[in-house]
Image (cartoon, rainbow, N blue to C red):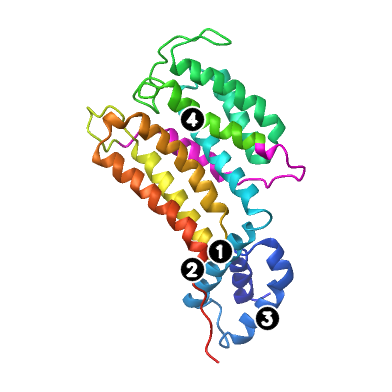
Amino acid sequence: MTALERRYRRLLLAYPRKYRAAHGDELLDVLLESAAPGRSVPEPREVWGLLLGGVRSRIIDQARGSAWVDGLHLGVTAAAVANLAALLPYAGSLPLWTALSALALLAISRGWVRTAIPLTGVVAAKAVALAGGCQVFDLTLLPVPPSPLARQMLFQFGSPLTVAAGYALALAGLLVLARRRRPLRVRSWWWWAAVVAVAWSGPPWMPQDTVYPLSLSRVAVEVVVFGLAVTGAYLARDLRWALASGLYLLVASAELILHAGELTRQHLAYWGLLVLLTLACAFAPYRQRRHCLD
């Protein structure tokens, strides 16, 4: 194997495994035949083309099966990520409930719906009770103090209704998914990285006297994920990402509505950006197709 062939094979790893098995050797032969004699490094345009084509193929490969089922599963996964992120900074004070929330996310991401339903329901009851200042299942010191990841107390700016909204969406989606007999798709482990980023309350970007602050890390993660959803909808011409984005937008909108009296221009800009990206997800699959002239 020459150095050029070895480098081409590494670039082909950007494509899904099934695609490489079906077309990898053929694509490699074309690349090697078109390469200049004595060349040992791929040209920059070939590197960019292979990487872009691999990402495109991976996105299109995700658009398999029922768009409605997969989109609902994606939306439930995103809601579970947000629910775990709310508890993660207080794992030292709530180790059991944080662990149960993590297990619920694991079950959802692996497609174990019947296991995820009771886990999500139990954690939801505890979280809503904590937001309302009540004791359920076990005694918890209230209010739950801040931690290195969060500068405020648990649910300091929330209410039982805002906390219940995220869990209600997750539970409703899981109950619908439980009616399916076919296994669900396993979600990426990158969702766990999003949990840590959303859980962090910094860096600060709102005034200190803001009644309902939003962390810049959470906003950044949501914008990146919504942007990836738009990209997926555009390339695959599929509505599953629009459905998932719309479900998460419902949770975010419910939180903002219940804090309507404390909203600032930054809150409205944040909400408007999520709405714009969700609409882009919905309309991107219907983009006009380009046809070559005869």
Q: Is residue 42 left or right of residue 62?
A: left
Q: How many residues crowd mark 4 within 10 Å: few (<14), some (14–19), many (20+)?
A: many
Magenta region, residue range? 176-203
Contact? badges 2 and 3 (CB < 8 Å): no
- Identify residue for label 3: 29
SS state under label 4: helix
Q: From the viewer's perspective, is residue 57 above or below residue 242? A: below
How far apart marks 3 and 1 lie (CA) works out to 30 Å
Q: Position of residue 101 (x, y in %)?
A: 57, 27
Identify the element where label 2 is drawn: loop
Name the disc covering residue 237, or none.
Answer: 1
Quadrant that contains the N terminus: bottom right
Q: Is residue 253 left or right of residue 14?
A: left
Please say if the residues under marks 2 and 1 sit with CB atoms less than 8 Å apart: yes
Going by the numbered disc 4, the residue's amino acid type is Ala
- Label number found at residue 165: 4
- Residue drawn at (39%, 49%), measured in percent from left and top? 275
- Foreground residue, 31 or 181? 181
Residue 167, image quadrant: top right
- Say which quarter of the image contains residue 104: top right
Q: Which amino acid is tagged 1? A: Arg
Q: Secondary structure at mark 1?
A: loop
**Which callout, 3 or 4, points at the residue further toward the start of the chain?**
3
Q: Tell me which numbered mark, 3 or 1, is placed earlier along the sequence.
A: 3
